[in-house]
Image (tube, rainbow, N blue to C red):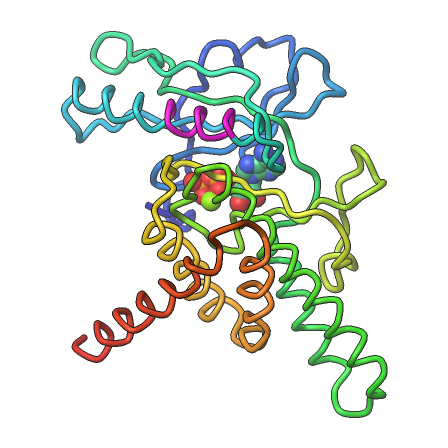
Amino acid sequence: MANTASDTEYTPPPLPLPFTNPESPAPVLLTQGAEAHVYKTYFLATSNAACLKVRPLKPYRHPILDRRLTRQRILQEARCLAKLVREGVDVPGVLALDWEGDAGTNGSGNGGAWLLMEWVDGLVVRQVVHGWEKSIKSKGQDSDSAEVAQSEGEVRELLRKIGRAVGGMHKAGIIHGDLTTSNLILRPVGRNGVAPSGGSEIDKPSLDGEIVLIDFGLAMQSVQEEDRAVDLYVLERAFGSTHPKTEGFFQEVVDAYGKSFKGANTVLKRLEAVRMRGRKRSMIG
Ligand SMILES: Nc1ncnc2c1ncn2[C@@H]1O[C@H](COP(=O)(O)OP(=O)(O)O)[C@@H](O)[C@H]1O
Ligand SMILES: [Mg+2]
């Protein structure tokens, strides 16, 4: 549940024990969703940025069930990441995890299960594409067509990279389960360790870089056509609703995916069936 900061100041639950040493810089809270709190911290040395994902305890859930579910999710996420790293797919590597967490007695402990992974520099694709759409709009009608064509070419290439990344993940036997443009990071190349910052880059971010897949909280292992097709369909729908001005280029994702592994084309056939079902469902309401 998103927290509305208006009436009460939000205090996140206590951090798990390894991250509470008063002599170390405190982890910085980045996002808090219903399922996870995400922090930027570091691993072993302060020069080594890391991302901490904590799954807080859910006081409204039965404690035994809560622990079991949390543990399943954390392990699932870590196993999928480990498998993808092994298969050479670009995802953050797992650095450490604790699937038990520390509930204490009557919830007095230091919080839920957690996963520490490598930090990925860059912006999420949602920000990158929003920035691109904004820059197109601000150029308006008086920009010359060569410039427009080049800019379009860049965004098309970005979409092809996304298609290849998803293809590589499916080839490795993993279904993401929550493919949105917030779960893809565009990591700049050749700027190791320097995260993009400052308003100007957010307004007009570079479309160069490598796609890194993140957030495997709903991922699973499967090589089924149906699961793969639904994964793509989720991305297509997310794209349509988040980036209406770029939706017209989505075919680039599909085409690149189709070339990314043997069997990808049968997944694309299935995608058409999944789309039909989706349309029928939305007609019925
Ligand atoms: N390994 C990482 N490196 C850098 N940023 C990350 C990393 N993992 C997550 N993030 C950032 O934190 C946000 C939330 O993390 P995510 O794993 O997607 O959790 P949620 O389940 O809350 O969506 C991401 O959209 C991204 O901006
Ligand atoms: Mg996410």
Q: Is residue 114 above or below residue 89?
A: above
Which of the two residues, 224 or 176, is positioned nearer the viewer here?
224
Residue at position x 20%, y 13% from top? Answer: 106
Q: Main secondary structure of the magenta part?
A: helix
Q: Is residue 218 above or below residue 208?
A: above
Q: Start and end of the magenta stretch?
A: 74-83
Asked if residue 76 is among those painted magenta in the image, a careful observer would answer yes
Asked if residue 186 is among those painted magenta in the image, a careful observer would answer no
Quadrant of the image occupied by residue 90: top right
Residue at position x 59%, y 58% from top? Answer: 259
Furthest residue toward front: 262
Location of residue 192 in the rendering, given as x and y in whole percent from the top left corner: 81, 34
Residue at position x 77%, y 82% from top? Answer: 139
In the image, taking residue 217 as reference, residue 81 lies left or right, namely: right
Location of residue 248 in the rendering, given as x and y in whole percent from the top left corner: 56, 78
Quadrant of the image occupied by residue 15: top left
